[in-house]
Every structure is written in C-alpha cells, then in structure tokens.
Image (spheres, rainbow, N blue to C red):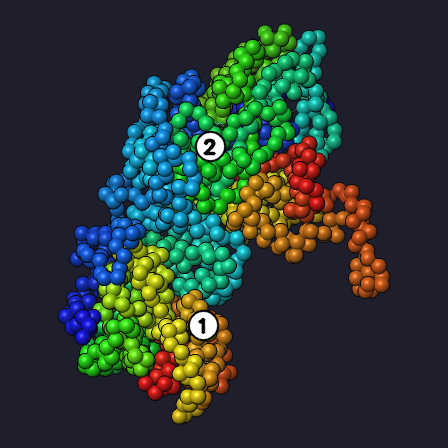
Amino acid sequence: MDQQVDVVVVGGGSTGCGVVRDLARRGLDAVLVEKGNLTHGTTGRMHGLLHSGGRYAVSDRKSARECIEENMVLRDIAGHCVEETGGLFVKRPEDSEEYFQEKLEGCRACDIPVEVIDGEEARRREPYLARDVEKAIALPDGAVDPFRLCVANAADAREHGARIETHAPVTDVLVEDGAVVGVEVEHETGPGKRVHREPGTTEEIRARHVVNATGAWAGNVGEMAGVDVEVRPSKGVMTVMNTRQVDTVINRCRPKGDADIIVPHETACILGTTDEEVDDPEDYPEEDWEVDLMIETLSELVPALKDARTLRSFWGVRPLYEPPGTGTEDPTDITRDYFLLDHGERDDLPGMTTIVGGKLTTYRMMAESISDHVCEALDHEATCDTAEAPLPGSENPARMDELMNEFGLRSPVARRSGQRLGSRADDVLDEWDPNPVVCECEGVTRAEIQDAIGEAGSDLNAVRLRTRASMGNCQGGFCSHRIAAELAREYPEPVVRDAEDELYQERWKGQRHALWGRQLSQAMLNHLLHATTMNRDGDPATLDAEVDFGAFDAGSEAGSAGSDAAGDSDAGTAATDGGCAADDAAIDGGRAADDAAIDGDREADDAAADGGA
Amino acid sequence: MTRHTDDGETEEANGPDEKREGVDGPDEKREDADGSTTGAAPSSPAPGVPEAGRDEQPSIFVPDDGEVPEGTPSERPATDGGVESAAGGSDSADLDPDAYDPVDVFPGGDLDLREGADSCYKCTSCDTSCPVAEVDDEFPGPKFQGPEQWRLKRKDDHDIDESITSCSNCMRCDDACPSSVPLSQMHNEARGQFVESQMEKLSREYIRNRILSNYRFFASIASKVPRLANAATKIPGAMKVGEKLLGIAGDREFPDFATQTFREWWKARGGAQVENPDKRVAYFHGCYSNYNTPEVGKAMVRVYEHFGYEVMVPPQKCSGTPMFANGMLKDARRHAETNVENLVEAIGEGADVIASCTSCSLSLRQEYPELFDIHGIEDVSEHTYEALEYLRINEDLEAELAGTELADEQSFAYHAPCHARNQGLDRQAVETFRDVDGVELEDVGDSCSGISGTYGWKEEKYEKSMEIGAEMFEHMEDAEGDVGMTECPTCAMQMEHGTGYEVEHPLQLLEDAVGA
Ligand SMILES: Cc1cc2nc3c(=O)[nH]c(=O)nc-3n(C[C@H](O)[C@H](O)[C@H](O)COP(=O)(O)OP(=O)(O)OC[C@H]3O[C@@H](n4cnc5c(N)ncnc54)[C@H](O)[C@@H]3O)c2cc1C
Ligand code: SF4
Ligand code: SF4
C-alpha cells in the first residue's frame, strides 16, 4: 500500500541520483522517482565533459574551484565512468592574447594545475589540430559517462536500502496543513522494469521531506506544490562524430561563444554547443543551423572535422536558475552555480527543498549540501562519506589483460567491456558461454546485454545506455534486432517487437540531423535492409488483424487481404517502420553518445514536423 | 648503356652486402641507425621528380632505429590536419580537409587509421569475400580487423588482437568493399604494430615469419649454389626438419632455383638490345623472376623489345609483399627505400615501372604510398604498371595478335591472382588471348588460390591454405587444358602443388604469340 518514508527525491538525473545515494548512505529511508529511465532529462543529453574548472576560471571562480575539487573526487570514486583525457585551451591567431593570460591567471588562482605549451607541442599531442593554433593551456579536463555515473549512484543507493522507481512521474505534490507531506506518482505503461508496482496504477508516497531535483522541470513540480521556481531553460546542441579526431578535450580559448569545445567520448567525438533560452524544456526547435555551426566553427580548430562522418545530433536543456529579480538578458551570463531553495524559509511551505542549476561535474557536492540540509530538517545525525566511498564498478581497477584470456574476448572488445563494466566485469562476463559479440561497432557482447536486461528490463534504450550497444556507425541498423533477440529469451514477442521499434526509432531520431554523406548512405542501407529482410516497411505481423495467408496461396482473385489489415492497426504493438516519417519521431531520445529515452509528448509534433508519411 | 644496368650499382643493391639487411638476428642494430627519416631521398631530386611536396615530409612510419621512447618529444615537426586558415580564421573555404594524412597519433609514430572507419557501412561484403574467414572459424574477418578494431582504438591503447596474424593479405576485402575502406592498409598497419610490440621476438613463429618474408635473402644465397640448394630441399626429410624446427609446411616442395638468375642473364646478354629514349620501361622483376623463374623475366624483355621499348633493369630489392603479410614493416621499409630511390631515378629518365608479378605491382602502387612516406613514393606509385596491362594500354595488342596462330594448340587453365583482381586485371589475360588461334584460355573462377604468398608456407596454415585452394584445384581439373597459367609466382606454386600441372606466365605465351 501507500508508503511512508523519510525522503522522496524527485528526478533521476545526476543530481537526484547523487542525493538518493547520499541520503541512503546516511541511513535515511529514501525513494527516488523518475518519470522516464535514469538520465531521461538533461543528464542524458549533456556533453560528457568532466570539467577541470578551466571553462569558468575567468567568469565564475567559485564554480571553477568546485569543479577542480570534484573532478579529483570523481577520478577516485568513479574511475569506470571517467576517462582521463586531459584538456587543452587552444588559441588561434585571431583569439585575444589578453584573454589567454586572464584564463591562465584564473586557473592558477583556482588551483587548477596548468601548463602552457606552444603550437607545435599542442600538435604533437593532438596531431589533427590546425596548423595555425599558436599555443595552448593544458589542464586536467576529462570525459565522464553520465549514464554509468547515475546507474552506479542508484545501484549504491539501492544497496543501502533505497527504492528506485523509474517510469513513475510525479503527478501531484501532497500538501497538508501548509506543509508538503509526500507525492503522488503514476506507474506508467511502457517498457522497463517495474518491480514494485503495477503499470497504470497511482501511488501516494508519503514522506517527511521531498527533494525536488527535476532540473529544467523544477518549475512544474514547484507549481504542483503551489510555489514559484523560476528556471530558465536554455538549449544546447551536441553533434556526434563517428570516430575520434582528438583524444584530448579541446576548448577554444576565447570569452564565450557557441561551438567552442570538442569532447572525446568513448568511440566518438562530441562537438558543442549553443546556448539559447527556450520556453519549454520538452518542446523546442532542433535547428539545422546549429549543427552546421558546430562543424563549421570547430573545424577551425580541427580541420579534419569538416570531412569527417557525423553520426547524429542531440539537444539538451540547461536548468539555469537565477534568483527572482536578477533579470539577466543573455542566458550565457546566467550563473552556472547551483541553488538550494528551502521552500519553508522562502515560501513558508516546509517539507520540500528544490535544488537546481549546477553541473554534472559537481553533482556530488550538490548532493552533499542538500543532504546536509535535509538531515538538519529531519534532525538526523549522520556524516557524509560519498567523497571517499567508491561507486559500484570502481572498487578496484579492471583487469584488462586477464579478462581477455579468461573470457576469450578479442582484445579491443575486452578492453571496452572492461572499461564499461569496471570491477563488475568478471561477474558479468562469467555468466555467458558462448559469448558472441552482439553489437559489433561498439564491441558489446551477449553477456553485457543480458546483464543490462537484468538491470533495466525490457527497455532497450536503457540497455543501450548501459552498454553502448547500437551507438556506433550503423546506429542500430545491423544490431537492433540482435539485441531484441536477446530480449526474446525472457519476454513475449509483442514486448520484444515494441522494444525493438523503440530502440530503432530512437536511433533514427538523432540521425535525422546527420543525413548527408556517409551517414545518409548508412541510413539508406539500414532502411532497405530492414524493409527487405524484415519487412519493416509493412510487416503484417505488426498489425493486429489476422493475416489471410490463404489469400496469397489462392492468387489474386481472392482479393487483397493486406490492405484491410492496415485499416485497423490500433494494436498494442507499435505499427512502425523504422524510418518512415509518420512514425519515426515517436521518440524523443536524441542523446547519441548517451541518451535518454522516450517522450510521448512530442510524438505528434515531431511526426508533423517530419512531414508525415 | 643506361646507368641502371651498371654493374657497380647492381652489386651495391643486390650483391655482397646482402647480409646486412638479412635475418642476422632478431634484434640486430641497423647500419642506418641514424634513423634517416627522410629515407633514401637523394639530396637533389632526380630529373622529372617534383621537388618538395608532401613526400618531403619526414617519415611518419617507424624509423629504422626503432621506437620513439614514450614520452620523449619527437624532434620532427608534427604533421597537421590542414592548411593554414586565413587570418580571420572563420572562412571555412580556407580549410582543406584533403590536406592531411593519417598522422602519428599513436605513440612511436604509428599511423592513425581510425578515420578510415568513417567509410564503413558494416555491409559485411568484406567478410563474405574473405577466403580465410571462410575456412578459419577463429578468424574474425576483415570487418573486425579493419574498421571495427580501428574505431575502438584510443590513443593509449597499444594492443592489437592476435588474430591479425591469420590474415593472409590477399586483399580481396579491399576489392569487395563498396565504400573504399582502406582495409588492407588497416590490416598491414595493425599487423606491423602487433609484430613490433606484441610478438615474442625470439619465438619460433617470429623467426619463421622473418625468414619467409625475407625470401629474397635466402634465395640470393641459394642461387649462388643453385644445384646444391635444389638438392638440399629435395633430401628426403629435409622439409620435415623445416617443419619441426621452424613451422614451415613440410608438404610443400621448395621452388627450384635457376642456375642462372635473371640478372646474370641480363648482364651476360649485355643489357638492353633496344635503345629508345621515347619508350623506356624500368623492369621490376621482383625476387621470384630473378631467382626462380628467369624465363618470365626473359619473356618480358623480349616482348617489350619486340614492341620497341628500351628496358632498364634498375637495382632493386624485395617489393615488400611477403613482409607486409608478416608485419615486418621495418624490413619492408628498408627495401622500399632502395626501390623507390632507384625507380624514381628511372622515372626521371622517362621510364614507367613495369612488374611481371601482380603482387609486386600492387605493392608499389598501393601499399607503398599507404604505409610509407619516402621521397618520390607517390611518383613510383603513379608510374607503376603490370607488364601485360601496360602493353594493353600503350600498344595495339589486339591488332598485333589478330590472326596470329600458335604452332601447337594449347589450352590453359587460367587463375587470376587476388592481387590482379585488386588492380582490375583479373580478365586481362583471357581477353588478350581470346583471338589468338590455337590458344584456349579458360578462367577457373574467382576463388583465391589459398597460398597468399607466405601464408600457405606456414605449417599451421597449410591445411587451411589447401582448403581455400580446393575450389581452384577442382576447376583446374575440370578445365580443358592441363597447363596452368597465372601472373603470380606463389599462386603458380599452389597451382602446381595442388594439381601437378606445369604453370606459365601470360608473358611467356605472349612471347610465343608475337614471336618475340
Ligand atoms: C548542452 C549541455 C551541455 C552540458 N555539458 C555539461 C558538461 O559537459 N559537464 C557538466 O558537468 N555539465 C554539463 N551540463 C550540465 C549538466 O548536464 C546538468 O547540470 C545536469 O545534468 C543536471 O542534472 P539534474 O539531475 O539536475 O537535471 P536532469 O538531468 O534534467 O534531471 C531531472 C530529472 O527529473 C525528471 N523529472 C522531471 N519532471 C518529473 C516529474 N514530474 N516526475 C518525476 N521525474 C521528473 C526528468 O525526467 C529528469 O530525468 C550540460 C548541460 C547542457 C544542457
Ligand atoms: S586480406 Fe584477405 S585474408 Fe586478410 S582479411 Fe582481407 S580478405 Fe581476409
Ligand atoms: S565491405 Fe567495406 S563498408 Fe562493408 S563492412 Fe566491409 S569495410 Fe565496411
């Protein structure tokens, strides 16, 4: 029945996951509720930069200091989520020398270890840098996998007694006698693991305190409680390249501006970004000029980008917040700091706190400060140990060489599995023999897919995020059905078909912004293969109606059975085609290097925008 | 007459100092240990060779003196990814994405070929055409070896999957790929990196591979005492000893060494018989025509002289084909430096380069520029042709052959080597002799012969090699003729080994047909 707990955390992004872990480790009874799967929001659509603080060293030294501090913490506690790439701030001839010096001083003032190198040395480290790059500041930027990070936080929280509930949007905030006493959640239908409640039911979770960690959506949840939270969502584009042109984070050393950073992430490079205020974090235009701008501008730093293959593009919205009355015009000027809004103090509504703003890099610090606040409110004495306790998967460094021999994996495959699974690699890989590669582009084996299915259930987009399966060149064209086949060991056929469609369409969605050159060829080949071998451009099996196979045998006189069937296809399974316009936009995933999932709300709009079929 | 037949030079590159570059120990120090990065580029470029340009760049491949120690900044300037952009910087028209090469991203100057993965659609055509993948379940195939393995690579990754050593370098995957993925370049580079950094240098396999790939070195010794060498390889049990000691397939017969090498013949005959500054060709005979089948080389010379060409025979070393297949890239580079230097000089004197072995021509044309950056290497690549191909381009062979008749009717079972296929030459022999009376040339199909140079010589690959070749043997036996024909000397060995047929080179038939 309805539950009484200490704390409900709303929002399964980096902030919410960090908070629920911290609270659980401090011994509180906590529940995390998230409307999609973990990282469904901004966290699943960010750049993947583990900030050294360099980007803020001139404009916002407080943030810069926090970044370098947390950067070091994450290397320790989340080694399997972090790649220590290092970073460069590069200066082209037309970039201001004065700013370069300011940047340098700023970094030093914030205790960010820096080294100034000349253009030649920069090109020795990153040979694809443009010839006229004059010099650079080297500093400890890194790459972070947001999904792995959130999953590890949630897993640790669960180990410490917390309940993690995905696909469960908060539909109301319960207010009694002028205080927040809990939330109402709806358990959605759709793929995913629902261990606690039946799909389609609502549940009231009563809690002594509610933490609103819904980022760009914080205003909506605030509204449910009757308070004003002024989040100014600002969108940014990220474009994913097929291969790595650089193995170091490359920043342009100039004040602020669009398209000034390249982050190597797993097998890809991600270019970013823009900063434009939008009205609705769920519904904003994804524009081609933004993608063009990324490639044009960043090829001034790395000319090879111009000619390189683009896989897809995706957008995220920053949950920027500024205290009422600040009135900043340009979103790039809004502080990147985070804010803790104590609604008891601020709005005379005790029982709820909102945390908003900040960065993924500082998620742990944000979580610590809000957990301190919650503990104080609940009169709970406990100390925070999240800066020292390693996350599951990072307990001990992966043993790459041994993995290879032990599990008979090809070396690049073993290397990638080891990097993804961290210290869990042994347990996961040990389960399956034979253990064929299911996703060839990213080197993902059956064992890893099955492990992810075990964790995430039938939601193949969640499986994708855990494993990277279907995130390479073919974008699911050659593997989505194989991944779905892994699901079929356990789940009934309609579920498998649905899950496959959702995965395939999510892949298609991001590719729509890369349909030229080689990715266009890939998309065409994918479509034709799926149409001709799986009949996905009109598969009778995806229609609910009986197919009159007899009519085929009887010849043309018997009338056309197929066309009738199409009429009443309001079936339980999605009648989709993996690429035909009417359906392909059903999903608002988009995050290529790592993304989150499905968003029914945008379906109609996108389909219309795509020009129907 | 031309200085290319000059004895002094011939000796220099082919003679007594042979030992220096042979297999005199697994980790010998090279004589050119100065790491002469600009290779053998002459101080002033040969006539007709463009100066400077990208080939002037220092070598991007392993310098001969070994590894650049990690962390030590290299003294050579880094190459870059483009031309300088205008001062404004934002005018994208100034960026030339074509202006970069695979550069030395990885430690030790190894090539970065990750970009090649951009062209792969995962269509798997390469895998389905790989003869090794067909018979070897342990071999993951070219798609994995090439674009997938490269794409998964990061800067600090050193290891290459061992399976790369099972690729025979037949290069059928190159030919199969609809999207120009540089598969064999990826394989060659990965194999080189594997052998360089992961293969046990004292292992039996390494030594065996080094011997097989330095065939020329042994052949040069053997041909000094050909009868003895021939006899030695025929001593009962000798090959079994080779198998035990070195892992060289015991069921193979070592090829006979000619009593007079091609170069000895050429010298004895007084070099070129035709002088013609307007029609010059530099003959790259390769090792096999020199040491084992000089009759092919002689046929080449006679046919070309018949058509009025002045033939030059520049000093030369191994084309590198067997070395690429075994990842011995340093050896290959050393030989390439000599070859390029001498061929560039010949090109400067107006010659085109002609090879009678399709693997040699492929190596000079494709693998050289893909793997090495030696002054003039692009020029060599652009000026190299296979012997029959060149005549078909430049002479009216059809008219010449129309109405010719061979004295004795002869039928041939023709096999097109994989490397010929890669150059688009797989039908040339059949087409050339179609109209010659008394000649029947039957194409035995597009399967791989299975020997792929040194692959079939390895004890552990012998059976797979014969399994790959089975289709060709069968078709040869079904074919009318009982004489084999092919352009590739190792395919010829395999054809002979599998069927007992005698095997000829198309040039020999052409020699007969034109009565040269
Ligand atoms: C383009 C871009 C690039 C960025 N790059 C970087 C970077 O490189 N490095 C870095 O450190 N930071 C970066 N950031 C910032 C960083 O991504 C965010 O600060 C961080 O991810 C915010 O996490 P969050 O948990 O607060 O919000 P979110 O991740 O948005 O989490 C909020 C969650 O709440 C859920 N939710 C909303 N409403 C409800 C409801 N009613 N019921 C239940 N759940 C609900 C949402 O589904 C969502 O999952 C970037 C941001 C953007 C936009
Ligand atoms: S070169 Fe030949 S053996 Fe090697 S992968 Fe390609 S097709 Fe297979
Ligand atoms: S044939 Fe070419 S495009 Fe197709 S899978 Fe092989 S490498 Fe990729």
- Alpha carbons under labels 1 and 2: distance apart: 50 Å
Assign the C terminus of chain A to one quadrant of the image.
Answer: top right
Residue plotted at (35% across, 74% down): B387
Camera sees residue B58: yes
Disc 1 and disc 2 in contact, CB within 8 angstroms? no
The residue that disc 1 covers is: B426
Front residue of A175 and B31: B31
Residue A169, position in %: x, y? 67, 26
Q: Residue at x 23, y 81 (%)?
A: B273
Q: Residue at x 80, y 50 (%)?
A: A565
Query: Which chain is mark 1 on?
Result: B
Asked whether B17 or B437 is in front, the reply is: B437
SS under mark 1: loop
Query: Could you tell me residue A536's position as x and y percent?
Result: 68, 51
Q: In this picture, is B251 found above or below A148? A: below
Neighbour class for label 2 at 10 Å: few (<14), some, many (≥20)?
A: many
Instruction: Judge left or right: residue A532 versus residue B127.
Output: right
Q: Chain of mark 2?
A: A
Label 1 CB-ligand 2 distance < 8 A: no
Left or right relative to A284: residue A403:
left
